[in-house]
Image (cartoon, rainbow, N blue to C red):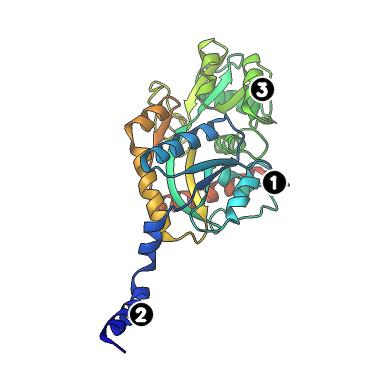
């Protein structure tokens, strides 16, 4: 064998010793990335997913496709991602329902902790606890006294049986040792109309209900996050008002299927953290009471573990159990 052929053979043998992850990271992405949104187009979850992926695409020039897979309390879309090829080309836009659904559905097809690779927690936002002004309570303390004296009389709206707002309401009233009657809707539009009309009397909602507050039909009694809202700094948190530790935050993050390569997760995380921390995105989120997070994958994993455990305890104590 000539010296040239020997050198070529030695080089070919040595190539596999180079880190495979380096090649994978350099090549990713080589085709469009599909982001699964398990909710209908036009809602808050969809708009936020589009905000982040749009900025990601602008920053990186990566081709990104939004695809909707709906049904069964968002479990159809989540289950689809759980079974996808773990190559970084199928991601889930996840919200609070991701941890709420496994707490209440009997025969769910996936495990929220075992079957996914967390990428990044993008945002958090607190909600508002509101009541109709016909309820004789001007403070949260007065509400607690009223609801305890009138068990089951307050009708509290939710966006669906077993939804995150259902669990949040169940947790709140368990912590104050009071009973309400939950009224479940298929979405928030009709619920907000009925709340403003007094057909239901309480709700944990987002800023979309503020026009009804300004019109004098609803009263905000507290914020559900542990810190006050930057948009409504004069409204105390529920935790401040005699329910220490009570917290309910909406959130949004991205996950891939379990066993997605660590190099791909790291690449995605780095770019999405830039998105979360960008002033333009932070300004847009602030309009809807959202706060940017931009976590590490491990921080997101720990957050998910805490949320899963909390809502499982809540569902068990409240006896919330549903069929898919």
Q: Secondary structure at mark 1?
A: loop
Label 3 crowding class (10 Å Cα cut-off): few <14, some 14-19, many 20+?
few
Check whether the beta carbons of the residues at disc 1 and disc 3 lie within 8 A of each other. Answer: no
Report the Cα–Cα distance between label 3 and label 2. 67 Å
Furthest residue toward top: 215
Q: Nearer the viewer, residue 274 or 158?
A: 274
Q: Secondary structure at mark 3?
A: helix
* Residue at 54% over, 10% down: 216
Q: Is residue 200 left or right of residue 4?
A: right
Report the Cα–Cα distance between label 1 and label 2. 58 Å
Which image quadrant: the N terminus? bottom left
Residue on which disc 3 sits: 190
Residue 229 visible? The answer is: no
Q: Secondary structure at mark 2?
A: helix
Of circles 3 and 2, the one toward us is 2
Residue on which disc 1 sits: 321
* Residue at 31% over, 81% down: 10
Q: Quadrant of residue 6?
A: bottom left
**Sequence-first disc among 3 and 2:** 2
């Amino acid at each position: 064998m000539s010296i040239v052929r020997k050198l070529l053979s030695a080089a070919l043998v040595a190539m596999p010793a180079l880190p495979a992850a380096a090649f994978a990271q350099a090549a990713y992405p080589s085709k469009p990335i599909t982001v699964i949104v398990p909710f209908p187009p036009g809602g808050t979850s969809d708009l936020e997913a589009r905000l982040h992926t749009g900025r990601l695409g602008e920053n990186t020039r990566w081709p990104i496709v939004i695809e909707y897979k709906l049904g069964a309390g968002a479990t159809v879309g989540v289950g689809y991602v759980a079974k996808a090829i773990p190559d970084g080309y199928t991601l889930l836009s996840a919200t609070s329902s991701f941890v709420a659904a496994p707490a209440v559905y009997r025969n769910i097809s996936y495990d929220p902790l075992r079957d996914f690779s967390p990428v990044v927690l993008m945002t958090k936002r607190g909600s508002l606890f509101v009541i109709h002004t016909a309820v004789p309570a001007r403070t949260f303390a007065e509400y607690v006294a009223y609801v305890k004296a009138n068990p089951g009389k307050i009708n509290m709206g939710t966006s669906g049986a077993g939804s995150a707002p259902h669990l949040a309401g169940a947790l709140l009233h368990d912590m104050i040792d009071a009973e309400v009657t939950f009224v479940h809707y298929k979405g928030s539009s009709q619920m907000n109309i009925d709340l403003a009309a007094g057909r239901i009397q309480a709700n944990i909602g987002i800023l979309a209900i503020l026009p009804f507050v300004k019109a004098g039909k609803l009263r905000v009694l507290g914020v559900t996050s542990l810190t006050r809202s930057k948009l409504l700094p004069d409204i105390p948190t529920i935790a401040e008002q005699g329910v220490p530790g009570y917290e309910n935050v909406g959130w949004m993050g991205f996950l891939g299927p379990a066993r997605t390569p660590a190099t791909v997760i790291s690449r995605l995380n780095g770019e999405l953290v830039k998105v979360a921390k960008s002033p333009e995105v932070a300004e847009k989120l602030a309009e809807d009471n959202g706060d940017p997070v931009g976590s590490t994958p491990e921080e997101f994993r720990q957050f998910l573990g805490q949320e899963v455990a909390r809502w499982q305890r809540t569902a068990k104590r409240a006896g919330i159990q549903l069929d898919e």
